[in-house]
Amino acid sequence: MSARRVPLLLLPLVALLVLASCADRAPSPATPSSAAGGDAFPVELRPEGAPPVTIDRRPERIVSLSPSTTETLFAVGAGEQVVAVDSASTYPPEAPKTSLSGLNLDPEAIAGYNPDLVIVESDLESKLADALAKTGVTTLVLPAPKSLDAAYEQFALVGKATGHRAEGEDLARRTREEIGKLVADTPKPDERLSYYHELDPSLYSATSATFIGQVYGLFGLTNIADQGDPEALGGYPQLSAERILRADPDLIFLADSKCCGQNADTVAARPGWDTLSAVRHDRVFALNDDIASRWSPRLVELVRTVAEAVAPRASR
């Protein structure tokens, strides 16, 4: 999760000089103000929580080092412009997956793909942007959004950055509407339900102050991880088994089913967990880890899963 990032190592000066001198990409031809698809360039982007960026011409060689953004690039129709994605970008299947890392950023390895635009989730002290700028490559930082509205804004921004403005705006609108309809159509339980969202078997969780917590908040669920302060520990506290047993959540959502093989049976086998209401009443839900941790258009699938978990608890 984003709460546990590996610091970016500083590259020796000589490496940066070699990187700058060895770039042999031919200069891109001048692009008219109206690019493919009727999108005008240059465009200025102001992503929330990141430095503003100006993209002079429609990017034709994009490297994505953010799994969420990789999904969005393909969703807005920019897939053919993507030449490389990081090792964690598992969707869509046709994405050109490589050994690049979005955590340990390597300017030389990234430059080897001859990009004209690189998209990352985080760039500590702009080290990557500064290094790639020496070769004329633009770096766009798109941090994890703090709200659903911020996620929708990123969809539109990715479209604007890649020459697919209309598609990005349409994706944002459709995702917002689909999620809104799912929430509106879900019967409301007679009593407020509590839940536990598990990130890994060591009992790390996400509070209601996080992006994932806001999804559950759409259905009025109470997060047992809040413990009086949803902002504590960056919103990703490690709970104790005693705390979870004491809270006795009505619903349990497992975002560690793919990575760690967790499911209703493994949860029930934990000491004392067979006494939990969620276990006894078959209310343990295994999520797709990737969908549950990304702010991509597949958010709709996560919201649908939560809606299906909540609906049976309402009176008909």
Image (spheres, grey):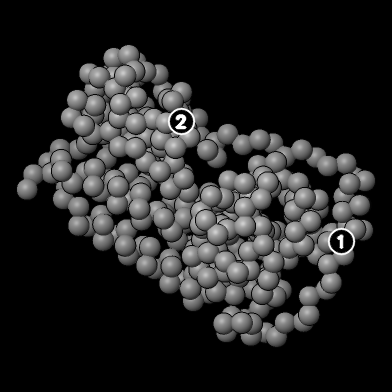
Q: What SS does tag 2 mark?
A: helix
Q: Give the image location of residue 256, x and y in percent.
A: 43, 34
Task: Please tell me which residue is depicted at 55% across the width and 74% down the height of the picture.
Answer: 164
Can residue 223 be seen here?
no
Q: Is residue 299 above or below residue 173?
A: above
Residue 313, position as x, y percentages in the image: 15, 40
Residue sitting at 81 percent across and 50 percent down? Answer: 108
* Residue at the spot of label 2: 260
Establish if 36 lies above or below 119.
Answer: below
Q: Calculate the distance from the C-alpha at mark 2 to the C-alpha at mark 1.
A: 41 Å
Q: Is residue 236 above or below residue 30?
A: above
Residue at image mark 1? 23
Bin the neighbour count of mark 2 within 10 Å (Cα to Cα): few under 14, some 14-19, many 20 and up: few
Q: Residue shown at 69%/66% (left/top)?
A: 61
Q: Amino acid at mark 1?
A: Ala
Q: Residues within 10 Å of mark 1 (few under 14, many from 20)?
A: some
* Whether residue 177 is visible: yes
Mark 1 element type: loop
Q: Residue furthest left?
A: 316
Residue 116 picture location, percent across and down: 73, 66
Q: Seen in the image, is 226 located left or right of residue 22?
A: left
As rendered, which of 184 and 267 lies closer to the eye? Answer: 267
